[in-house]
Image (spheres, rainbow, N blue to C red):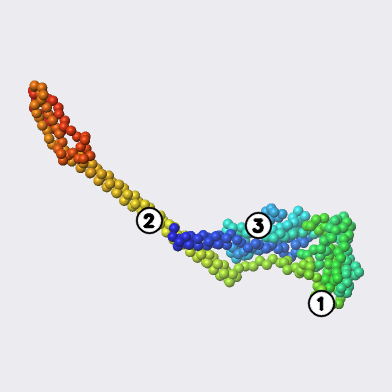
Amino acid sequence: MPSTLRALLCLGLCLSQRISARKQTLPKPIIRAESTYMVPKEKQATLCCQGSYGAVEYQLHFEGSLFAVERPKPPERINGVKFHIPDMNSRKAGRYSCIYRVGELWSERSDLLDLVVTEMYDTPTLSVHPGPEVTSGEKVTFYCRLDTATSMFLLLKEGRSRDVQRSYGKVQAEFPMGPVTTAHRGSYRCFGSYNNYAWSFPSEPVKLLVTGDIENTSLAPTDPTFAADSWDTCLLTTETGLQKDLALWDHTAQNLLRMGLAFLVLVALVCLLVEDWLSRKRTREQASRASTWEGRRRLNKHKDSLKNDHETQWPWVELKAGVEPGWRELCVRPTEEGVTAGNRGHWHSICQSIPDDAEGGRTTC
């Protein structure tokens, strides 16, 4: 196979793998809870799954099993859907994820979202020691108490509800904090719970006021539990003109790339067919020449054999008197020209006796 053809085939295979890899990869969707992931009992929860423009189907999974299906209309102008979960209760609280489909291709599964149901137990009480107003640099301790038997307590700062501090106790749990800075200022609530997804009513808020070092952020905690909530809204958008043009250009480029690949593969196949046809033609021509040469060789050999047979002649026939009365002898012998050095010892005169009264006729040999 010529080196050019090998190069074309290698290029085609590489492009095919790249296109296939690109085609089989969809961005992982993002799942969010609208407003908050803490939903009061018997209220409606709304989860948003954000995927890609052109997705024809979204699936919501709960604890690994299919929970709901949504199909956006029109799919080419919407990049996500909302799943509504009515009448929230403990059976619907847990871990959710989502996936979406473009054509026949499914995306990866999104990250897990913990959905919590609240107002399942009594209301705990929250207090802070030494008091709600402290100076920067001091240490404080929050106390969450719930008379109903429980094993886990949770403390949250309003505005940062995704980051939960957990503590354990039979009827009361402590949450030490500090040295505090102005970054700790704000309102806090606590919950009681038997598991991670079913919580009690929230406590009354306790506002912590930190004085001094008003703008000193160097002492602000680096713990991610104090990261601000930035995900409590569903940012589903419709496709703009620029996004549509970019998507159209992307599809056009992919189609042109596929057409170029198909052309290269077609050229490679034509080259392979032409090379195979030429190879077969050469093989047939060689076989034909060999057959013709063999036929000529056999014909020449046959002619030589006929020539040798023709050169062996018996032109002399002699009829002479026999030894006994009433009989004659008919003798045949070869000429000197018909006897060669190779057959001289094999040729001799042949005589046969015939009666005198034999009817006349013609004798050949």
Of residues 157 and 358, the one nearer the viewer is 358
Q: Could you tell me residue 326's position as x and y percent?
A: 8, 22
In the picture of the structure, the residue carrying the numbered disc 3 is 59
Label 2 amino acid?
Answer: Leu
Mark sitting on residue 342: none
> Seen from this angle, which residue lies furthest right?
130
Does any portion of residue 69 appear in the rendered image? yes
In the image: residue 252, left or right of residue 36: left
Of residues 35 and 280, the one nearer the viewer is 280
> Where is residue 2, by image quadrant?
bottom left
Label 1 amino acid?
Answer: Asn
In the picture of the structure, the residue carrying the numbered disc 1 is 216
Q: Are marks 1 and 3 in contact (CB under 8 Å)?
A: no
Specify the quadrant that holds the C terminus: top left
Task: Give the spatial CA distance, label 3 vs label 2.
Answer: 57 Å
Mark sitting on residue 278: 2
Q: Could you tell me residue 306's position as x and y percent?
A: 21, 41
In the displayed structure, would residue 289 be above or below residue 26? above
Q: Are marks 3 and 2 in contact (CB under 8 Å)?
A: no
Q: Could you tell me residue 279's position as x and y percent?
A: 39, 54
